[in-house]
Image (cartoon, rainbow, N blue to C red):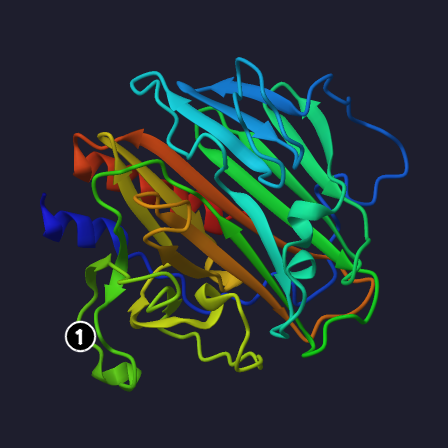
Amino acid sequence: MNHQRMILTAILIFAGTMPLHATELKPVTTIHSKQQTWTTPSKNYAILQRGGVEIVVVNNQAVDDKVLPGHRAGYSGIAKITHKQQSENLFVPNYAGLNYEHIHDGKTRDRKILFEPRNLPMQLRQINEHTVELYQAPAGHYRLESCQRYELLENGTIQLTYECTPRANSFANQYIGLFWASYIHQPKDLSIHFPGFENVEGKKIDQYPKPQMVRGVTPQHGTHATHRSRNDQRLFQHDSDFPLTLVFGYSRHRFQQPWYYGVSRSMGFAQIFRDADQMRISQSPSGGGQGNPAWDFQYFVPNYEVGKTYRFVMRAVYHPIDKPAAFLDRVAEEYVKLNATQ
């Protein structure tokens, strides 16, 4: 693998970008729609096909049929992803990828509250043949209204647009913490890769070495699990016994750009984010069970306001990685396009 080529492809700097939730947003999903502009699928899932990729987007209900045998309740998102060159599901069949898992505020709470996205009613909305949404009305402890739009772009890239509106002042530490997981089915290599800096925690930024491709490895669930950007100095108050150990289990690495990828069965799976959304990336060697790593990400809304809408947009690329430089060129291209979105 040509590491110099990889680094040159990766290091594209977007300077001076401001958070896109600094001003009020006009929703792009159907989160606040008064009129029904979607259809409701007859099943708890919808199949999208485009650009050589097929995904099955599911709500948080259990499914057991030929398409999704033994799919467990609670695991919404992409239950299955395949490619014209790889017919085996990337994700653990019982679980999902790009799975909306946690709402939290750093407080130690009952498990049902910490896993509200799994437990609260979730509506599947078909927008068109390439786009579906998962909507949750404000309910439960946090009363966070949300809508996730899963769109399969023309080239097979997945674009996830998430919008949320807090409907109550229910977050104790004045921030909203959100977490997505992707449970990968038995890859040979559990690690992830991202452009950044190894073992720099505690150093000043001007002491960082030149960025390189970092191989992220975590020894056990919750240990050195979360990688932050080089400029992310945000501190979020949390209880010392906060049970979601991935969230604040920081690694000693930092990333230069907010994207990463892993490899399974000769396929690369990259998750790509906007600089302005200030995402954090997380990993677990066993989040989906022994030999099934979780390749995750986090989004925070600090100093939230009730009734205000917040948004992030990310993309995922699932493509053969027999030519690593070409794969990274594709990721870099999607990163540039994504940062141009509003």
Q: Position of residue 291 (x, y in %)?
A: 30, 44
Viewport quadrant of the N terminus: top left
Q: Is residue 288 left or right of residue 305?
A: left
Residue at image position (43%, 39%) is 316
Q: Is residue 263 left or right of residue 88?
A: left
Q: Residue furthest top?
A: 66
Q: Which residue is mark 1?
A: 209
Q: Could you tell me the amino acid type at mark 1? A: Pro
Q: Is residue 215 left or right of residue 81?
A: left
Q: Is residue 213 visible?
A: yes
How many other residues sit within 10 Å of disc 1, few (<14), some (14-19) or many (≥20)?
A: few
Q: Is the residue 109 above or below the residue 26 in the image?
A: below
How many marks overall?
Answer: 1
Q: Position of residue 323 (x, y in %)?
A: 16, 32
Q: Is the residue 10 above or below the residue 82 in the image?
A: below
Q: Is the residue 242 above or below the residue 14 in the image?
A: below
Q: Nearer the viewer, residue 178 or 30?
A: 178
Q: Position of residue 338 (x, y in %)?
A: 47, 46
Residue at image position (17%, 30%) is 322
Q: Is residue 258 visible?
A: no
Q: Is residue 70 left or right of residue 62?
A: left
Residue at image position (22%, 33%) is 321
**The quarter of the displayed image where residue 61 is located:** top right
Q: Nearer the viewer, residue 336 or 184?
A: 184
Residue at image position (52%, 82%) is 240
Q: Secondary structure at mark 1?
A: loop
Q: Residue furthest right?
A: 34
Q: Position of residue 329 (x, y in %)?
A: 26, 40
